[in-house]
Amino acid sequence: MRVALFATCLVDGLFPDVARATVRVLRRLGHEVVFPQDQSCCGQMHLNTGYPAEALPLIRRHVRVFAGFDAIVAPSGSCAGSIRHQHADTARRFGDERLAAAAEGVAARTYELSEFLVDVTGVIDVGAYFPHRVTYHPTCHSLRLLRVGGKPMALLRAVDGIELAELSAAESCCGFGGTFALKNSAVSSAMLADKVAAIRDTGAAVCAAGDSSCLMHIGGGLSRLHVGARTLHLAQILASTRSEPALA
């Protein structure tokens, strides 16, 4: 299958290893992976902060860049959720039905990584090896907007050598929420403290998730409190093998 990688702004700018890990997993399963060089922000942050007019050119660009691929895979539940649930509606808000129809076509072929692996390829065991104790935080957009359900956990359970630890109150938000963490810093910090305490209680060496934004927030909390755990994206664990370990 010819698959386009939508890396997302945060991954491309701050966490490129997540994009590389996603490519390794997809290629290991026999897919041709293309990285369209003209991709840019999908417009999620503009839409979520009340700037739909500014998001419209980004939606047009996204639809143009990703048209024609069999599937588009993003290592992000929030960006995949925005593409699937906001792009066409925004185009219609501005009276551009042609763009809305094209956006619906792209959205129908857009998947968060765990969705693509489980629902499209039908693969649970991707050949990963990760001999560490791991807990998993289900991010809000993947859980509530995309409804990926237990797909990430199913993929993790199939990883050779892994020890999974249940995270208490796993479905509680970590407190990031994009600009929420800036506009409501006190509430965000309190939510983060609860999440970090729950991670600490698992005794896990790694907290995994499917969104780099949430991992950035959680990772900051873990490092400041010297909890002894670190964060890794789901893709990095799935890409890990005996010859290419995610953790040295």
Image (cartoon, rainbow, N blue to C red):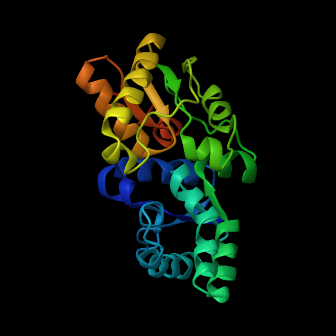
Residue at 47% in and 63% down: 44
The quarter of the rendered structure image containing the N terminus is bottom right
Percent position (x, y) of residue 163?
55, 17
Nearer the observer, 111 or 158 = 111
Can I make out residue 114 in this image?
A: yes
User: Splitting the image into 4 quarters, where does residue 46 fall?
Assistant: bottom left
Nearer the observer, 33 or 79 = 79
Label total for image:
0
The quarter of the rendered structure image containing the C terminus is top left
Percent position (x, y) of residue 128?
55, 34
Percent position (x, y) of residue 143?
63, 41
Residue at 59% in and 56% down: 81
Q: Is residue 68 left or right of residue 245?
A: right
Q: Is residue 192 above or below residue 91?
A: above
Q: Is residue 177 above or below residue 62?
A: above
Can I make out residue 246 in this image?
A: no
Q: Is residue 85 left or right of residue 57?
A: right
